[in-house]
Amino acid sequence: MKTISTALQAHLDGELTTLAELVKITRADETIIAFTTHDADLIADGVTYKADGSYSGGALKQDTNLKANDFNVLGILGSEQITRDDLEAGLYDLARIDVFLCNWSDLSQGLLRIRRGWIGEVTFSDGQYIASLRGFQDMLSRRVGETYTPECRYDLGEARCGVDLSSLAVTGTVSGTIDGRSFVDNTRSEDSGFFNDAKLTWTSGDNTGVSVEINNWDLSSFVFTLWLPVNKTIAAGDAYTVTPGCDKRFTTCRTRFNNAANYGGFPHLPGLSKILLYPDSK
C-alpha cells in the first residue's frame, strides 16, 4: 500500500503539476547513488539527487498477474556517479533501488514511492548501461528452502560448512598472461582441478580488490582460466590470493578438507531411476 501526503495528493489532483522522478540506489556497502529527472539537483530526506543528465527512467508498468514487468534504469557510462568499472566489478549486484515521485517546486510535500526493488541484469550498449529493476514479484519465483541432493548444499567456508578458508588461502604472482580470462603462474604445484570453482582476489595491479571465480586450474600448463574476463588488464607481476575450490562432492569434502562430518549433502541418496523401480513378475 502506497502512502502519500495530503499536500502532494492535492498537487497531483490539480490541473498543473511540477513533478520529477527520483531514483535512489543503495549498494550492499551502504553507498547511496541518487539521480533525478529534474533539471537541477534536489535534496529530499537528506539525500542529494543529482541532475547531471546521466539518468533517464524507463516506462513503469505494473499489473496484478505477477508477471515480471521490469522497470529499466538507463544511464550514461560517463557519469561521475556510476562507472562501467564499478558495474563490472559487481559493486551494484543486488543493490536496492527506490523510485519516488515528488513536487520539485515544494519538496516539503514529501515523496511518493512508486517502485522498489533490486538491480537485476545489467547490459551495456552505445555508451549506456541498462539496469533492470526486479520487484517483489520476482521473489515469488525464487527457490525457498533447501533440497535433498547428493551434492553439498553449503557454500565452502560458511558456518555450517566449518572449513576455515583463511588458513587455506595461498598467494601467488602472475608469470604471464594469455587473455582477459587466462593467465599463467608457473610457481604453482597444486594438482589440476585443485582451484576449480575457487575464489581468487587480486591484491595488486589494475584489478586490486576485485574477486573472481576460477573455472579451471591446469597444472600441466600452469594456467588459470576464469569464468568471466576481468574488466582491466592482467599483467605479469600482479599478485593474488586464492583459496581451494570445492565441487560439493563427498569425496572432495573428505579428502581435500577432511570435513566429512560436516558434509551438507546426501551422497547415498538413491537416484530417480531407483525411486521409480517397481516389482515385476520375476
Image (cartoon, rainbow, N blue to C red):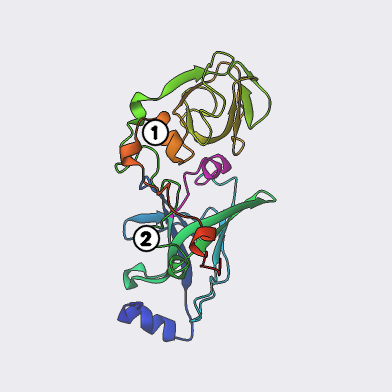
Q: Is residue 3 depicted above or below 145 in this figure?
A: below
Asked if residue 212 is among those painted magenta in the image, a careful observer would answer no
Whether residue 147 sits left or right of residue 182 in the image: it is left
Question: Going by the picture, which residue comes out furthest to the top?
Answer: 187
Marks 2/1 in contact by CB < 8 Å: the verdict is no
Q: Residues within 10 Å of mark 2 (few under 14, many from 20)?
A: few
Asked if residue 89 is among those painted magenta in the image, a careful observer would answer yes
Closest to the observer: 12 or 74?
74
Question: Label for residue 145?
Answer: 2
Q: Which residues are magenta?
A: 81-95
Question: Label for residue 188?
Answer: none
Identify the residue position indicated by label 1 in the image.
Answer: 254
Q: Is residue 154 depicted above or below 241 in this figure?
A: below
- The answer to whether any part of residue 38 appears in the image is no
What secondary structure predominates along the stretch shown in magenta? Answer: loop
Q: Is residue 233 depicted above or below 22 in this figure?
A: above
Asked which quadrant contains residue 170, the reply is top left
Which residue lies at the image location 60% right of the left edge and 15% below the top edge? 175
Closest to the observer: 8 or 200?
200
